Image (spheres, helix red, strand yellow):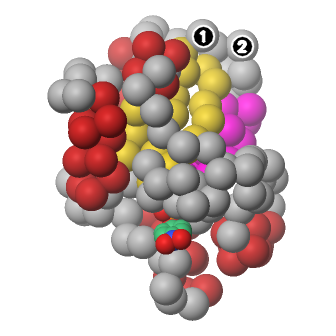
């Protein structure tokens, strides 16, 4: 099983949405027995919580099922997942601090965005629904490429 962990700050907006979108693509591609994914946040503010209502709304608007309870990113995740995907530079730095150094399994989500490679997935927390729709589009595009990358790399 190839395991992917999406990571943001609070684990209630960006990363659970990335997880939900990617899970749907895994299912649509019939790859449930090959690839799995989960999400976490570098902060502990929302551990045990369901996603932000705006995250749930934007997922519902696009018919993407979303089910997640917040968890904090910890060092043990490094050995449990093949790919650790940070939503932005700040998450990436926090992850490196938690891990005690860089690791080859660490990527940023928009490394896979054909329209804006290497940019941050913006934090939508303080904005309105427009920001959540933008994030959805970014994640939808980026997870398409991520899936292509994983399929090619692992011969799926
Ligand atoms: P996320 O968004 O990192 O995409 O889940 C945030 C959620 C909560 C907070 C910040 C960002 N917060 O400060 O509580």
Q: Secondary structure at mark 2?
A: loop
Residue furthest front as drawn: 44
Question: Which quadrant of the structure image shows residue 107?
Answer: top left
Look at the image and give the residue range highlighted in magenta: 15-28
Instruction: Assign the magenta stretch its main secondary structure.
Output: helix
Q: Which of the two residues, 46 or 26, is positioned nearer the viewer here?
A: 46
Magenta stretch holds residue 22:
yes
Mark in the foreground, 1 or 2: 1
Q: Residues within 10 Å of mark 2 (few under 14, many from 20)?
A: few
- Number of the label disc, if any, that sits on residue 1: 1
Residue holding disc 2: 33
**Residues at circles 1 and 2 in contact by the CB criterion of under 8 Å:** yes
Quadrant location of the N terminus in the rendered image:
top right
- As for residue 77 lying within the magenta part, the answer is no
Find numbered disc 1 in the image and state the secondary structure of the residue it sits on: loop
Count residues near mark 1 (Cα–Cα under 10 Å), then give few for <14, some for 14-19, many for 20+: few
| Callout 2: CB less than 8 Å from ligand 1 | no
Residue 28 drawn at (x, y percent): 72, 36
Residue nearest the observer in this picture, 8 or 33: 8
């Amino acid at each position: 099983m190839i395991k992917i962990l999406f990571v943001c700050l609070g684990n209630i907006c960006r990363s659970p949405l990335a997880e939900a979108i990617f899970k749907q693509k895994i299912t649509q591609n019939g790859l449930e027995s090959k690839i799995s994914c989960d999400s976490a946040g570098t902060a502990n503010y929302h551990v045990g919580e369901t996603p932000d209502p705006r995250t749930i709304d934007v997922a519902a608007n696009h018919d993407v099922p979303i089910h997640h309870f917040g968890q904090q990113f910890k060092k043990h995740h490094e050995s449990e997942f093949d790919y650790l995907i940070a939503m932005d530079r700040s998450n990436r730095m926090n992850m490196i601090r938690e891990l005690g150094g860089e690791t080859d399994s660490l990527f940023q989500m928009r490394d896979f965005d054909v329209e804006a490679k290497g940019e941050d997935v913006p934090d939508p927390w303080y904005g309105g629904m427009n920001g959540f729709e933008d994030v959805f589009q970014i994640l939808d595009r980026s997870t398409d490429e991520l899936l292509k990358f994983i399929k090619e790399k692992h011969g799926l």
